[in-house]
Amino acid sequence: MPERETSSFEGDLTIRMRREAAGVSPERIATLARLAIDRRRRIRALRTSAVAACLVLVTGGLLATAAVRAGSPRRPHRPAATTTVPTTTTQLRAPVSRMPGLVQIMGVAFPTSNHGVVLLQQCWPCQAKTGSYTNWVAVTSDGGASWQVKQTNLPISGSNQVSFANSSDGWAAGWYTHDGGLTWHQAQVPGGALIGSVSTADGTVWAESDSCRGQPPAASCNSLIFTGSASGSSLTPVADQPFGSTYAPGTIVAESGSTAYVDAYGPKGTELLVTVDGGRSWRTVTSPCPAGDYAPRSLAVAPNALWQFCQRGITITTPTGTAVKGVPGGKAILARSGNGGRQWTSAAIGTALVGNLEPWSFTTSWLWTDRLERTTDGGSSWTTVWSASSVPSPGKGQTVTPEDFSSESASAAEIPVVISSKKGSYVVVERTADAGASWQPTTISLPDT
Amino acid sequence: MTDPTTAPDARRPVTDGSRPADVTAELQRLGGLALLLCGNVADAEDAAAEAVARVLGGKGLDGIDQVGPYLRRTLVNLVARRARRRGYERRTLVRTRPVDSRRLLEDEVSDRSDLRRALDSLPIGQRAVVVLRYFDDLSEREIAEVLRVPVGTVKSRNARALDAMRRSLTRGDENA
């Protein structure tokens, strides 16, 4: 039957195309797009300057010619032009110095209201195909009044998750700091396993490792869960390792020293696992995401509350293959559980509000998309408490790029933004202590190297 | 291309970064579209980034989900322009250095999958239709709006492209 052959071929074509198209990196496209935008802006500014210079020359020539023709040896006296200084509402402190190249925020953490850490990556010189990257850390111990900025050997990547147990002890991937983020050291991990996400709670650090060999659908993984003291320098595998060779862990989130949750991706799809005895045993928790089109993301934990999004259009690569969960767009689902995942409460919300959650109770949470939202009714309604337009105008020709946020309580949050222009980039950290009702900016000057 | 099994965050949803979910999903989708149109990752990422820069300019990436059709049209136009330029360069290269360049082209082609080879053999107009239809899941009317051609043209290009791809992929399967 020709008709059946056609539809089977077309269905096969869709599957093959989606598999083939999974090889591009959205992060890399975003970086290249920023570079291209920056390049176009510089060219436009150069062109404008050239046109202005030509106009000045031509006008000057015409005036001189007119003066000569009128027989006047001197230029006519003109009153000085009145410069109208625009009324500025800016509260930003001007940076002492700016950093050249492309600067990106790679992580932020404020373990206390006084102590904060911002991780930065500088691409300089930065071409589209190749770039030289330098990693920097900015640390404050006085609530943002002053910042110490220095280069760091911490290998910053897009997947870094910075987690501090207190103002001294912090972890990012397989690296730790005991001086509040100024210096970082590689942790001792058995077998040299590559650590992915980390999470700290009650002085304990939880971590998961990604160790896979080969290509899907025949990849073999040896993924492990580790724990350790947040003030220590090593990680130890937990007694019961829940993953076989065909499962790989996603993000791990710690609720306490003994309780942690972890996403897992494998042949049966996605699963949510929990331990309540420090990793001696694990059980599978019912996923709030409907089977098929939806995949979980942004697993987050608060005291006695578990929050998670279920989203469509996500590409998931497991050791046994790559799958796209549904077509992007449509409604996402926000699910909450108040009893460790035994029962879930769901609310359908628009995709525009899918992002990274930081809940502080069963009803109150922050949500970062391209702006900061806050809910106090479990996600039924969200209030935008910050967006890029909230930043006091930094000046003409400057762009404001927010990347991430951190929250230190249900009412206090920090958002670092990069402000860049052709002169270079610096960072402004916007802070609120009243649930987003008001924001105070502090400026981080970056070295001009 | 990044090895999907060794990249640190390869097994997590691609939207798990700090970037807004819609922006990441749209960039992933646009990148996939570019990859199928261009045939290799480097060109695809460059083309997708250039399209984003042209359409969004100084507005940043935030409004990317509201300019989908325009972004796709810009991407297709960019790829078509690059294909024309590359065709000219290849013709010139083959004329001036016949032996080396032919070997170079054969090596390049042999690394590609059957699907990419089948797509590459299509004219850019047909390739755009078939990729928008079966990868991007657009209707014939939506494709007509994106490419600014009549719906009838979309239908005929789609039929010809499917016919050519069916022949190409069947031949590839038989050879395998």
Image (tube, coloured by chain):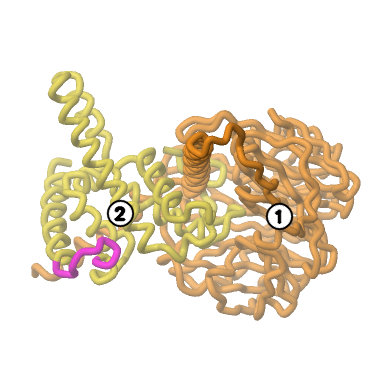
Chain colours: A orange, B yellow
| Residue lying farthest to the front in this orientation | A71
Residue A31 makes an appearance in the image:
no
How many neighbours does mark 2 have within 10 angstroms: few (below 14), some (14-19), or many (20 or more)? Answer: many
Q: Determine the image quadrant of residue B134.
A: bottom left
The reply, left or right, for residue A201 in relation to residue B53 is right
> Which residue matches tag 2?
A17
The reply, left or right, for residue A340 in relation to residue A159 is right
- In-front residue for pair A370/B171: A370
> Which residue matches tag 1?
A84
In magenta segment, residue A177: no
Residue B82 placed where, x, y %?
28, 41
In which quadrant is the N terminus of chain A drawn? Answer: bottom left
Label 2: state its secondary structure: helix
Q: What residue type is disc 1 on?
A: Thr
Q: Determine the image quadrant of residue A254.
A: bottom right
Q: Which residues are magenta?
A: B144-152
